[in-house]
Image: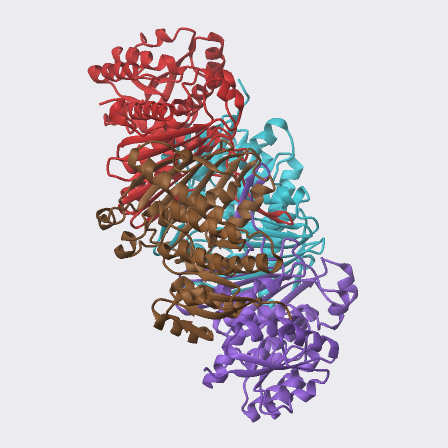
Chain colours: A purple, B brown, C red, D cyan
Amino acid sequence: MEKKVRFAIIGAGRIGQVHAENLTRHIQEAEVVAIADVVEEAAEQTARRFGIACASGEPAEIFCREDVDAVAICSSTETHANFIIQAARSGKHAFCEKPIALDLPAVDAALEAVAECGTKLQIGFNRRFDPNFRGVRDAIRNGEVGSPYLAQITSRDPAPPPLSYVRGSGGLFLDMMIHDFDMARFLLDDEVEDVSASGAVRVDPAIGEAGDIDTAVVTLRYGCGALGVITNSRQAVYGGDQRVEVLGSLGSVSCENNTPDRVIRQTEAGVIHPKPLYFFLERYLTAYGDELRSFIRAILDDTEVEVTGGDGRAPVVLALAASKSYREKRAVAVSEISV
Amino acid sequence: MEKKVRFAIIGAGRIGQVHAENLTRHIQEAEVVAIADVVEEAAEQTARRFGIACASGEPAEIFCREDVDAVAICSSTETHANFIIQAARSGKHAFCEKPIALDLPAVDAALEAVAECGTKLQIGFNRRFDPNFRGVRDAIRNGEVGSPYLAQITSRDPAPPPLSYVRGSGGLFLDMMIHDFDMARFLLDDEVEDVSASGAVRVDPAIGEAGDIDTAVVTLRYGCGALGVITNSRQAVYGGDQRVEVLGSLGSVSCENNTPDRVIRQTEAGVIHPKPLYFFLERYLTAYGDELRSFIRAILDDTEVEVTGGDGRAPVVLALAASKSYREKRAVAVSEISV
Amino acid sequence: MEKKVRFAIIGAGRIGQVHAENLTRHIQEAEVVAIADVVEEAAEQTARRFGIACASGEPAEIFCREDVDAVAICSSTETHANFIIQAARSGKHAFCEKPIALDLPAVDAALEAVAECGTKLQIGFNRRFDPNFRGVRDAIRNGEVGSPYLAQITSRDPAPPPLSYVRGSGGLFLDMMIHDFDMARFLLDDEVEDVSASGAVRVDPAIGEAGDIDTAVVTLRYGCGALGVITNSRQAVYGGDQRVEVLGSLGSVSCENNTPDRVIRQTEAGVIHPKPLYFFLERYLTAYGDELRSFIRAILDDTEVEVTGGDGRAPVVLALAASKSYREKRAVAVSEISV
Amino acid sequence: MEKKVRFAIIGAGRIGQVHAENLTRHIQEAEVVAIADVVEEAAEQTARRFGIACASGEPAEIFCREDVDAVAICSSTETHANFIIQAARSGKHAFCEKPIALDLPAVDAALEAVAECGTKLQIGFNRRFDPNFRGVRDAIRNGEVGSPYLAQITSRDPAPPPLSYVRGSGGLFLDMMIHDFDMARFLLDDEVEDVSASGAVRVDPAIGEAGDIDTAVVTLRYGCGALGVITNSRQAVYGGDQRVEVLGSLGSVSCENNTPDRVIRQTEAGVIHPKPLYFFLERYLTAYGDELRSFIRAILDDTEVEVTGGDGRAPVVLALAASKSYREKRAVAVSEISV
């Protein structure tokens, strides 16, 4: 019988349930022994749904349990850093949803605790496990584009989040584009040295009134000298639209969106192809399972995780630099934010 | 706790293992209590792999078990009809891989037993559960193509099966095109009235020496008057290629192949898109799970199965008619084979 | 100054005007000295439009002119063979629209006259000059598909012709599918040895009442042993749909339709690609010019034309065989029609 | 007989020959009475090739001719403004290749002369006449994207120009991206208010040594508040790659590249689609004819030209702003350059 990693899940919201389903049903090497949520009823409901033996309203209890090898931190962002620290101190590995925190001192405190305790920490940048993005990255690694010139990352949500969410989100750069900052680093396996950001309120004036933007373009300069550009929109009515392209000396590699099927209609109205999958949970279905499989494999084999704490920190730095660039209407060196 | 359907699996070969994995790991409403294979070791190995409590070298034992609600018949074709009969007589529902049998009397004996005993029988035409083919069928049902004119079904295997397999297969029409005969009926929800077949040996002369063909075109005439055409090839080096298109008064609906990803390379050699998934097990991964889910749902809700015994019989008739047409170089009415 | 070929055009209908425009405006090596049409006014109007010096109501006059090197025969089908003979006897090269004639004796008389007189005859199978079809053919010639297994030719008109036209057309096989019979030979550079035809009336019952069909499938067997299949429909509401695909031991080569542009709309309704060009005159715009350039080049260089009289005869034979197969519901060897 | 516009062409280089071919062969409403080039032999050679009666080594002579209605200015950039002025003063309409000049005072002097003399001036932004870009623009005008959020313009040359050309080009922003600045205005029918530029030397270090860049990203803010981003690369080995996409409240409209054909190869190496047309002259073949047709129509009907002198000036302003932004690493308001 293969060894299993025993998980506790913190947070029984949308993403907590995705991970619960994968860990209880689809990943043989995992079992879930407990789930905790400050809303105890939510924990209980999810526990019933996935046959998890223990549900709790006290996340802190999780860290006292002897039968827990690893925690999946799926609670709200402001709790992440603290739970990472508690996990590390109680000798438990942690899988944590992004971002680690919205301010760098909190991020750094969490990473230090992990480093001191020698536990593993993996950040939930699930897009790194999407076969399309991974395929582009692998092609670049294989030298298929040659020397990179330019990376273009397009990222559009199908619809903006509720205003209440926007207000606590830390802003588009930290909440939405953070995935793309991670993607920018992932694709080229290189660090970004300076950023230049533009933003606008185009989708909904209420987002502007809440102090945020809903449309943005950020230009990046990589350490190797290549350029990058990320465009974000909070709304693309035809579905979630996430594509990347990298051009280099030997050509370009890009990826298109996944679609629910490959059915094509030819009518008087046109040749109608399927729309992209609407929602990120559908789009990244296999990626959510695969990131956990990768984390579990790192634990069982005692190897480096695929998405490290440092990988969780870097996009926060970039998001902070982008915010500064947007406010000051000038290019901002990453070194101005963090050395 | 939801009620579960308790399965026994007969046959621990490739397809038996696919169903074992789905039933044990991915379908909550099923459990597998036993697996049998005439090669006992194969049964034992698969039982170990998927945590099935009982493994047996005697498929007949399965039918005596009280704790089995349904059997999944995944053994070789010549055993199908007999196992269907045994399942029916022992009051067990049966999910049976296609084809039911290569000769009509055997098929009819099996269907009669099922009818007498009032058990359920579903035939494993998994392509009916593929989202692409289903999407085309649904569009036609929704009236999106209007009155149908012409159905075109393209089906190509990546590589021919071993010659040993070819010899016992019943020939291309009964072994390979039988899926497409089913698809022809499924897409238009209509019966085929006559067929006209052409065949050739193009892929491998040894297939011809074994008395079979490897390339074929069959034209169909539907009851409604529409035409259909099925083309088959035992080899498409770029992968499994299965597409359909239906043209009608309002336009056409078609589907393209699934691919492992959506990565596109632009190089001096061209703009390179991903190849179709090579093997049918990859292409129909979700379809294999979904056909079992559908069968289980029919048992739990006591409703009609989605792919009936009659649906298993009709393509055998069409395959026999196509064989006759090919030999006699003339159009053959289905009524010449079966009334 | 480069030598020019002096043309007379017979027939001032739709296709006559297409050739007139190409010969007067876009092909430097041609000039048009006269145009004739039994409807004299039509000839005069076209002459004015394209600056042609002489217009006549008497096509026969054309053949007496000393200043005419070649004739472009664009009159109605039943006049083709006779005009070819007159052209040959008066020492003029002839470019003739397809088909040469609807019956073989007339075709053969025309070809004999040409052979006796040593003039050149090119048949207007314009699709051979379409970059897409030519690209597929060239790929096959280059060995890119390896040994051919199966050729699939899809041909759909946007809308059926007027009933008056249908009645005199010789039927779908001779009027519409004749292009595809030519394409079948062109693609594989091989002769068809037997055909098997199915047909139906699906688009308009009035076409059936006029004694014709509007939907058809014809299976072909090539001399090399490969199979082919042609599907025809008189109506595809989304535009003219003409595609081919050839599968062989090394893969497949196919071509898609031309579209007016490459604009893609992503909306809530789907991802909408442009429809195929509606009408064959738009689709084959460059092909119409290129077939004439090829003919002129053969005259100026005194080389073999690219589409010979034999190439004009063969599809007539195939169409007659298909008609016979359709009537007799059996495969018909081409040798039954013509040796 | 329709009235014709009598042209003189100044400049017998690559683009001069393209216009000569269109004006002499493909545009009925034009004739070319003279061609001038400082290299007299070039003028003579082109005159012979296209049957132009008069060839001259003295462009200035052109403006004295009574029989010239319009000039096509295809000479090197530094001569454009002066020839525009001479054309205006001699009462001749001018079609002028882009850019008008590399510095604003010269541009303004040319536009003033035209305004004073009341002649017509059209700038050769040929991409405005490409069916794909025009299709996107028309869709936006029709309200198909709703309120615009973001315009993305991708523009890549197949290979960098010779270094000698680079040195005199005015730099990437004025030489290459100027087309995209025009496209940015054309697509949204709106003015750009500020720009933010990044650039890099990635393709060839020698370009950097010549004081230029070969890779660039420019972010734009439109008057309406929408954002735009233009990416440029001097090299895409797979061909000329020019695409645009505009996202708005109702979805997105984009266009893909033209290809030489629509042939698709499926092999073990992948599914290979055709590459974009390599060279801009091929890509914009019809656009070059159509921009002249549009100019001639404006002359014959005495209407406003489709691409005005102001349309020629605005991208120069944007290019100068982008250069300044690149040098100063900050967002630059267009009003800093020109009011």
Viewer-proximal residue among D242 and A295: A295
Residue B300 located left or right of residue B23 = right
User: Looking at the image, is A95 positioned above or below residue D226?
Assistant: below
User: Looking at the image, is B236 positioned above or below residue A172?
Assistant: above
Q: Position of residue A286 (x, y in %)?
A: 53, 67
Q: Residue at x 53, y 83 (%)?
A: A5
Q: Position of residue C86 (x, y in %)?
A: 29, 10
Q: Judge whether residue B191 can be spotted in this image.
A: yes
Viewer-proximal residue among C304 and B68: B68
Q: Residue at x 45, y 48 (%)?
A: B312
Q: Judge whether residue C263 can be spotted in this image.
A: no
Viewer-proximal residue among C62 and A156: A156
Viewer-proximal residue among A327 and C98: C98
Q: Residue at x 29, y 49 (%)?
A: C249
Number of marks: 0
Q: Quadrant of residue C220?
A: top left
Q: Position of residue B323 (x, y in %)?
A: 33, 40
Q: Position of residue D79 (x, y in %)?
A: 51, 45
User: Looking at the image, is A55 positioned above or below residue B117?
Assistant: below
Q: Residue at x 50, y 30 (%)?
A: C279
Residue D90 located left or right of residue B154 = right
